[in-house]
């Protein structure tokens, strides 16, 4: 359930970044937050997955979508709807790959911190 809350907060943060900033700052914040959102969705679908695996999956999905843009498929799908444009983008941009890494690292850090505070096998074994 925490992952769902993180996903909502991430979407709000992304929309907020676009509202208060423009240009490269808003674009690259959006790229990083896109990967944070993907990581939150991975954690939501597979809640017992370790933080590093969640971050790796989020980064891999983000990179796969970026590289898919080299094929022209997302651009074609974008012509048929705004949702496809938001999810898949339309134009490959190499610096996006770095910012997806920033988002994955941030998601890993937050997930790791949250997991260390959550009760689990280690916490109950130490009692």
Image (spheres, helix red, strand yellow):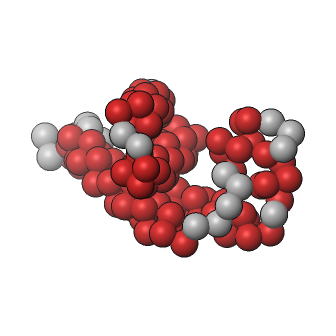
| Rendered residue at 72%/36% (across/down) | 83
Residue 43: percent from left, percent from top: 49, 44
In front of the other: 18 or 105? 18
In front of the other: 108 or 1? 108
Residue 73: percent from left, percent from top: 83, 59
118 in relation to 31, above or below: above
Question: Can you see residue 44?
Answer: yes
| Rendered residue at 29%/47% (across/down) | 110
Residue 23: percent from left, percent from top: 43, 50
100 in relation to 15, above or below: below
Q: In the figure, is residue 57 to the left or right of 108? A: right
Q: In the figure, is residue 65 to the left or right of 95? A: right
| Rendered residue at 84%/44% (across/down) | 79
Question: Can you see residue 36?
Answer: no
| Rendered residue at 37%/61% (across/down) | 102
In front of the other: 36 or 125? 36
Q: So how many labels did they put on this image?
A: 0
Q: Quadrant of residue 50?
A: bottom left
6 in relation to 57, above or below: above
The quadrant of the image that shows the C terminus is top left
Residue 58: percent from left, percent from top: 52, 56
Residue extending farthest left: 127
The quadrant of the image that shows the N terminus is top left
54 in relation to 94, above or below: above
Q: Quadrant of residue 84?
A: top right
Q: Quadrant of residue 71?
A: bottom right
Residue extending farthest front: 23
């Amino acid at each position: 359930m925490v992952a769902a809350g993180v996903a909502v907060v991430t979407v709000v943060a992304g929309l907020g970044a676009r509202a208060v900033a423009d240009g490269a700052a808003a674009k690259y914040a959006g790229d990083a937050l896109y990967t944070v959102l993907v990581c939150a969705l991975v954690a939501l679908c597979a809640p017992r997955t370790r933080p590093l695996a969640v971050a790796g999956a989020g980064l891999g999905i983000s990179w796969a979508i970026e590289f898919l843009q080299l094929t022209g498929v997302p651009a074609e799908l974008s012509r048929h709807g705004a949702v496809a444009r938001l999810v898949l983008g339309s134009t490959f941009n190499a610096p996006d790959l770095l910012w997806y890494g920033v988002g994955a690292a941030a998601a890993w850090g937050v997930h790791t911190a949250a997991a260390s505070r959550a009760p689990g096998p280690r916490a109950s074994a130490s009692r």
